[in-house]
Image: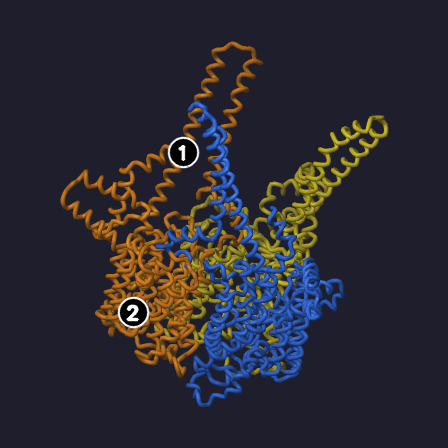
Chain colours: A blue, B yellow, C orange
C-alpha cells in the first residue's frame, strides 16, 4: 500500500517516465509533440508547473505552449471531441464525417479529415463528392441502426462509407458526374454499418477490428453484381494477365519509382496524384508521427516487393503495390501492437507478406473482373494480429484501449511499470518476512543460550512461539508460489510436456 | 412474490395479452388462426371457457371450433407431433420426411410438406422422386449418426436432403429418369447431416442456424466435381456473361413480371411452374400467414431489384431474382427476429441486399459453371442476424426458442411483459422501503420530541434501532444498482467512454 | 476412495487392461509393438517383471526385449526426445527437422523422418534440398517468434515448411537447380509459423488442429502471386478441363491401378515414384501400424472414387486421387478420434468425401492455375472433426492428448474404465444409503411396536430422529440426480422438447 501511494503522489516518478518516452520518440516527433494521455490530463499541469519552476527559461516556456497547442490538434483531439458533445447534432455529424474520412488510415482526427478531403478535391471533385456522400450515408445509417454512439463519433462507421463512395466512383466505367451512381453509392454505404456490425460480432471473439472488410465486401459486391457489361452501372474492365510482361531493368525510371511512395499512400483512397499523397502524409503527421513513418515505410516495402516479384513497372509506379502495405504497416507498427523494436520489425515483415498477398489476390480477383481492393491488407493484418507468442515484447493492446500509436505506447509503458512495481513489492514482502523470521530465530537462540532451563522447558519454549511463525512462512511461500504461477515463466513448462507429442497450440 | 402469483392465477390478465395479440395479427391471420403456444396448452381450455361463458353467441362457438381445428393443422402441428411419438418408426419417418420438405421454407408442418410434394409432382415427377430420396437418405443418415432425435423429428436434417436431391436432378444434363443419378444423390444426401452437424458446431457459437448451407456446399461440390464435361454425371452448361444484355423497357411484359412472384417462390425448390409456386404459397399460409406474407414480399423485392440492376428480363421472369429474397425475407421477418415494424423493415432491406448479393454470386460462380444456389440467402441472412444494436425492438430470439413467427411473437410479448412486471416490482419495493424508512424516521423524531432524556440517552436510542434500518436501505439500494446494472441502460455509457477513441464494437 | 487405491496399487488390474490392448492390436502390430504410455513408464518395469516371473520361458524373454527395443524406436520415441533435451541445440534442431518431415503424416518420429528424407532423395535431390531448407527455415522462424518449445520439438512447425519447400520446387516451371527459388522458399517457409499461429488462434476455439492449412495458403499464395507468366518465378501451367476425357473401361491398366496405391501415399510429398511411396509406407509402419493401415486404405478409396467419377485414368495412375484421402483417412481413423469400428467406418466415409471434394477443388482451383494442394484433406477432415453426435463410440480426443493412434487408444480405454468405476461407485453408495435407511426404518417400527407410549410421545419420538434421516436421503437423491444430470442420458430429453419445433442443434 505505501508504495502505490508513493507512486501516485510523487511527481518526479511520473516525470522520469515521460522523459524516457520523449527521448525515444524524439527522432519521430521532432521535439514538438509530447504525447500525454487523456487520463493523465489532471496530472499534466502539475507536472509542467514542476518543470517550469525548476528551469524557468524562455525556450522552455515556448515549448510548453507548443506542447499544449499540439495537444489540441494532434492525436485524437480528445478535448475537441469532448467539447463537441454539447453541440448541435448537425455540427457533430460534420465532426464524425471528418473523423470517418481520416479513420481509413486509423487516424481519429477531424483536422486530418479536412486535409484528406482537400487532397481528394485536388484529385477529382466527383470522387470527393461520392466519398462525402458515402461517409454521410454510412454515419446516418449507423445512427438509424442504433449503433454505439462512441464508435460513431470516432468515425468508425464512416471510414468504410468513404471508401465505398470513392472506389465505386473510381471503378465506374460511366464517366464522372454520372449522377445515377449516387443511388447504389447510398445503398451500399448504408449497408456498411450492417456488415460492420455483423463482422464485429465475429471478429470480437478474437478481439480483432473489422478493418476495411465491409468496404471490400460491399465494393466487390457492387462491381461483380453489375460487371463490365451492365447497361446502367458498367465497371472498368479488369482481366487476368495472360502473357509475359516486359520487365527489363534498363527501363527502370528512378524518378517515378521514388514518386511511387507518396502515390502508394494516395492509393489508399484510390488517388494516383503524388501531391494528393503528400497531402495525406501531412494529415497523418499532424495526428501521429509514428503512423506517418510507418505509412512511408510500408509504401517503400510495397515498391521493393513489386520489383522483386517482376511486376510490370507501370503497376509499381502507380502505387498499386504500395497502398495495402501502407495500411498493414500502420496497423501492426504501433496501432494494434504496442510499438517496440520487435513489433516494428514485425510490421515490416507484415508489409512484405501483404505485398505478396496483394499480387496473389489481384491475380485471382482479376478472373472475376475485380480489383484487389484492400483485401490483402485486411487478411495480412488479421493474420499478424492473431499470432500468439511467448515473448512479452510483442504486446497486442486490448481493442478497447487502442487509440493512436503514441498513446498506446504510454498505456503499454504504464502497464509494464505497474507490473514491475507489483513484482518488486512482492519481493520486498518476502524479504521482510524472511527478515522477521530471522530476527525471531535469533531471539530464540539467544534466549536458549542465556536461560538455564531443563530440556523439557526449552522444548516447550521453542515449540510454543515457533509454531505460528513457521506457519506464517509456509503460507507466505504458498501465496508466492501461486502468484508467480500466474506469471509467464511457470506455464511454459506445463504445456511443454503436454504438447511434445500432441497437436496442441498448432 | 404476491405479484407473480397474481399473474399466474388471474385469467383476465392472460386473456388481455392474448386479445392484444389477436388484434395485431388480424390483418395477416384473417381471424381464423389464434396461435397458442404448447407451453400454454394447460391454460388454453380455461381461457376459452372464460371466453365462451361471457359471450355465448353461436358465431363465437363456431369461431372457437375453428380455432381448435386450426390449432391442429396450423403452426408446427405440435399435438400431432406429440401423438406421432408413440407410433411405429416407419410412420414417424414419413412425418419427419414431410416436415423436412416444408422446413426449406422454415415451416415445421407435415401437412405443408404433403402440399409441397404435390407441387413438386405437378412440376416434374423425376425431380419429386429425387427430392423424396434425398430427404429420406438425409433423415436416415442423421439417425445413423445419432443426431438429436428432436431435431430429426422437426425435419431439420431433411430439408437439406430434399434440396440436394431436387437440385442435383434439376442441374443434371443427362435428362430425366437417368437412374444412375440416384447414387450420387444418396451419397450427397447422406453427407448432409455430417456437414450440418459440423457447421452447427461453428454457427452455434454465435447462436446462428445453418440455414441451407449444407445443401449449397454439397450441390456445388457435386456439380464442380463432375462438371459439364463429365462422362457419367454431366451438368448443365453455365457460363459467365460476356456481352451487353438486350434491356429495353418497351419490351417489358407486365403479365410475366407479375407471374414472376409465385414463380420466385417456386424457385426455392428449383421449380419454374407458376402453379407450383401458388401451391407452395398455400402450403405456407396453412402453417403461418406471417411467413406467407414475407415470402410474397421477398419475391416482389427480388423482381424489383432485378429491374433496377438491368438484369436480362428472362432471368427476372423465371424467378431467379426472387427465391433468395423469399427465404431471406422470411428468415429476418419474424422467424429469427421477433416481428416488429423495425424487423419488418429490416427484412425488406435484407431482401434487397440479398438480391444484390445474388447477382454478384451468380456472376462469380458462373466462372466455375455453378449456379448461385441459395448462397445469397444464407450469407445475407447470416449477416443480418449477426447485427448487434442498442435498440430493444430488434430482438433476436434464442435459437432454442425459434418456432414459427406467430409463436415467436407470443414468446417475445410474454418476455417483454415479464420484464415490465419485474421492473415495476422493483420500483414498488424501493418505494416501500423508502416509506418504511420515512415512518421509522418520523417515529424517531416524535420519540425525540416527547421524551425528555439526556443527550447520551437520545444518542443511544437513535443509534440502536436506526442502524439496522439504514443497513437495510443500503443493501436494497445496492441490489437495485446491481440489478439495473445488468440491464441495457447502464452499460451503454460504459463502452461509450472506452470506445470513443478505440476500435471496440466495430 | 478405497476403490481408487485398489486400482492404483494392484498390478494385476493394470496388466489385464494392457493384455486386452495387446490382444486387439495384434493383427496390426505383429506382436512386436506393445504401446506403453509415457505416463505409465514408472509402472512398466514392475508389470513386465510380474509377467516374466509368472511365465519365465525364453520366447517370452525375447518378446520382452523386443518390446523394450520397439519402445525406443516406435510411436513418438518419447525416451529419445527426453534424452535430446540435454543435447547441444544444433543436434536438437536436426531432431526437430526430422520430426517435422514425418509430421506431414502425423508421425512424431525422427527415424521415420530419416526414412522419408531418403525417399525424397530417391525421387529428386533438388526437391529434397528444398524440403530440407523449408523445414529448417520454418523451425528457426518458430524459434525467433518464441513459439511453444514443446510444439517446435514435436516438429509441429516444421511439417508445413517441408511441404512449402517441396511443392514450390515441384510446381516451379524454371527447372531443377534454379537457385533463386531458395529466396521465396525461405521467405514462405519462415511465414509458416506466423500463419500456423494465427490459424491455431482460430481453430483452437473448436479444439481443432491446423493440419496443413498454412502450407496450402502459402504455396497457393506463391503460385498465384507469380503465375505461369512470371519472368523470375514461373509456375507450371494448370488449366481447367474443357473437353470430354477419353474414359473407356477396356483401356484400364490393372498394374498401374494397383501401383497407384503407393504412388498416392508418395504424392503426399509430391512424389510420383512408387518406390518412394513404399519407403514412406515403411516409415509409417515403424511409428504406428494403425496409421500405416489407414494410409493404404485411404489411397485405395481415392483410387476407387476416381474410377467412380469418370476421372481421366492418368490422374488416377499418378496418385492424384489418393494423397488427400490418405491424410484424411489417417486423421479420422485413430489420430484425432479414438479408434473404434464406428470411427474406422467414419474414416472411410471421410476418405470418399475427401475424394469428391478433391475433384471439385482441383476443378475450381485450375481456373486460377492452381493445384488442389491438400485443401481437400484439410476441409474434409475439419468437417468430420466438427461433427457432434450423441453416441459415445465416436470420441474426439482433446487436442492436448493426441499422440499416435495406439497411445490414443490406451488413453481412451483408461478413460472409459475410470468412467465405469465411477458409475459403479455411485451405484454402490446409493445402495448403501438405501440399506441404512431401511435399517433405520425397521428400528423405528420395532421401537414403535415394543414400547407402549401415548400417541403424543410416539409422535415426538418418530419425528425427532426421523427428520434428519429423511433429509439425508433427500440430499443424497438430489446429488445423485445432479450427478447423473451431467451424464449423457438425461440431457437427451431436455433439448428434445426444446428443439422439436426449433432450429437448435442444426
How many residues crowd mark 1 within 10 Å: few (<14), some (14–19), many (20+)? few
In this view of the protein, which residue sits in the foreground, A446 or B205? A446
Left or right: where does residue B445 sit relative to residue A64?
A: right
Q: Are marks 1 and 2 in contact (CB under 8 Å)?
A: no
How many residues crowd mark 2 within 10 Å: few (<14), some (14–19), many (20+)? many
Say above or below: B250 vs A53.
below
Farthest residue, direction front: A450
Badge 2: chain ID:
C
Say above or below: A11 vs A477.
below
Q: Quadrant of the C terminus of chain A?
A: bottom left
Please name the residue shown 54% across and 10% down the image.
C453
Question: Under tag 1, what secondary structure?
Answer: helix
Left or right: where does residue B181 sit relative to residue A264?
A: left
Residue B264 can be seen in this image? no
Image location (x, y in percent) of residue B295: 59, 63
Image quarter of residue C99? bottom left
> Which numbered tag is attached to residue B207?
none
> Which numbered tag is attached to residue C319?
2
In this view of the protein, which residue sits in the foreground, A236 or B329? A236
Farthest residue, direction left: C58
State how far apart marks 1 and 2 are (Cα): 55 Å
Residue A154 can be seen in this image? yes
Image location (x, y in percent) of residue A254: 50, 87
Please name the residue shown 62% across and 77% down the image.
A280
Question: Under tag 2, what secondary structure?
Answer: loop
> Which numbered tag is attached to residue C427?
1
Left or right: where does residue A401 sit relative to residue B125?
A: right
In this view of the protein, which residue sits in the foreground, C132 or C201? C132
Tags 1 and 2 both on a single chain:
yes
Farthest residue, direction bottom: A251
Q: Exactly how many numbered labels are in the figure?
A: 2
Image location (x, y in percent) of residue A386: 49, 62
Amino acid at each position: 500500500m505505501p508504495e502505490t501511494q508513493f507512486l501516485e503522489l510523487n511527481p518526479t516518478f511520473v516525470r522520469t517516465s515521460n522523459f524516457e518516452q520523449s527521448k525515444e520518440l524524439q527522432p519521430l516527433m521532432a521535439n514538438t509533440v509530447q504525447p500525454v494521455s487523456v487520463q493523465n490530463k489532471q496530472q499534466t499541469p502539475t507536472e509542467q508547473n514542476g518543470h517550469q519552476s525548476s528551469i524557468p527559461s524562455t525556450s522552455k516556456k515556448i515549448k510548453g505552449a507548443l506542447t499544449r497547442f499540439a495537444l489540441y490538434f494532434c492525436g485524437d483531439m480528445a478535448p475537441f471531441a469532448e467539447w463537441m458533445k454539447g453541440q448541435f447534432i448537425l455540427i457533430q455529424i460534420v465532426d464524425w464525417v471528418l473523423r470517418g474520412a481520416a479513420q481509413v488510415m486509423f487516424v481519429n482526427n477531424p483536422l486530418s479529415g479536412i486535409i484528406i478531403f482537400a487532397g481528394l478535391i485536388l484529385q477529382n471533385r466527383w470522387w470527393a463528392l461520392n466519398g462525402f456522400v458515402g461517409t454521410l450515408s454510412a454515419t446516418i445509417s449507423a445512427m438509424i441502426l442504433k449503433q454505439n454512439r462512441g464508435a460513431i463519433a470516432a468515425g468508425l462507421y464512416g471510414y468504410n462509407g468513404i471508401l465505398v463512395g470513392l472506389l465505386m466512383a473510381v471503378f465506374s466505367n460511366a464517366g464522372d458526374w454520372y449522377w445515377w451512381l449516387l443511388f447504389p453509392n447510398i445503398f451500399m454505404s448504408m449497408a456498411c454499418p450492417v456488415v460492420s456490425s455483423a463482422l464485429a460480432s465475429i471478429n470480437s471473439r478474437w478481439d480483432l477490428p473489422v478493418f476495411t472488410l465491409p468496404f471490400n465486401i460491399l465494393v466487390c459486391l457492387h462491381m461483380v453484381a453489375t460487371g463490365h457489361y451492365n447497361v446502367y452501372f458498367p465497371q472498368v474492365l479488369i482481366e487476368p494477365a495472360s502473357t509475359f510482361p516486359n520487365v527489363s531493368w534498363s527501363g527502370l525510371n528512378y524518378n517515378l519509382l521514388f514518386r511511387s511512395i507518396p502515390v502508394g499512400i494516395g492509393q489508399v483512397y484510390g488517388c494516383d496524384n503524388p501531391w494528393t499523397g503528400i497531402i495525406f502524409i501531412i494529415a497523418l503527421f499532424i495526428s501521429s508521427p509514428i503512423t506517418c513513418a510507418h505509412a512511408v515505410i510500408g509504401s517503400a516495402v510495397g515498391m521493393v516487393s513489386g520489383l522483386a516479384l517482376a511486376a510490370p513497372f507501370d503497376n509499381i509506379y502507380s502505387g498499386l503495390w504500395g497502398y495495402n502495405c501502407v495500411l498493414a504497416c500502420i496497423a501492426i507498427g504501433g496501432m494494434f501492437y504496442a510499438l517496440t523494436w520487435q513489433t516494428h520489425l514485425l510490421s515490416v515483415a507484415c508489409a512484405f507478406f501483404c505485398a505478396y498477398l496483394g499480387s496473389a489476390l489481384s491475380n485471382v480477383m482479376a478472373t472475376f473482373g475485380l480489383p484487389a481492393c484492400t483485401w490483402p491488407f485486411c487478411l495480412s493484418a488479421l493474420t499478424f494480429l492473431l499470432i500468439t507468442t511467448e515473448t512479452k515484447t510483442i504486446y497486442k493492446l486490448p481493442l478497447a484501449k487502442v487509440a493512436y500509436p503514441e498513446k498506446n505506447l504510454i498505456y503499454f509503458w504504464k502497464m509494464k511499470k505497474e507490473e514491475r512495481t507489483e513484482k518488486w513489492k512482492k519481493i520486498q514482502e518476502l524479504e521482510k518476512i524472511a527478515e522477521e523470521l530471522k530476527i525471531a530465530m535469533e531471539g530464540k537462540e539467544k534466549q536458549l543460550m542465556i536461560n538455564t532451563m531443563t530440556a523439557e522447558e526449552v522444548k516447550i519454549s521453542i515449540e510454543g512461539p515457533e509454531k505460528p511463525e513457521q506457519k506464517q512462512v509456509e503460507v507466505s511461500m504458498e501465496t508466492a508460489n501461486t502468484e508467480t504461477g500466474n506469471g509467464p515463466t511457470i506455464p511454459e513448462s506445463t504445456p511443454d510436456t503436454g504438447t511434445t507429442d500432441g497437436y496442441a497450440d498448432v
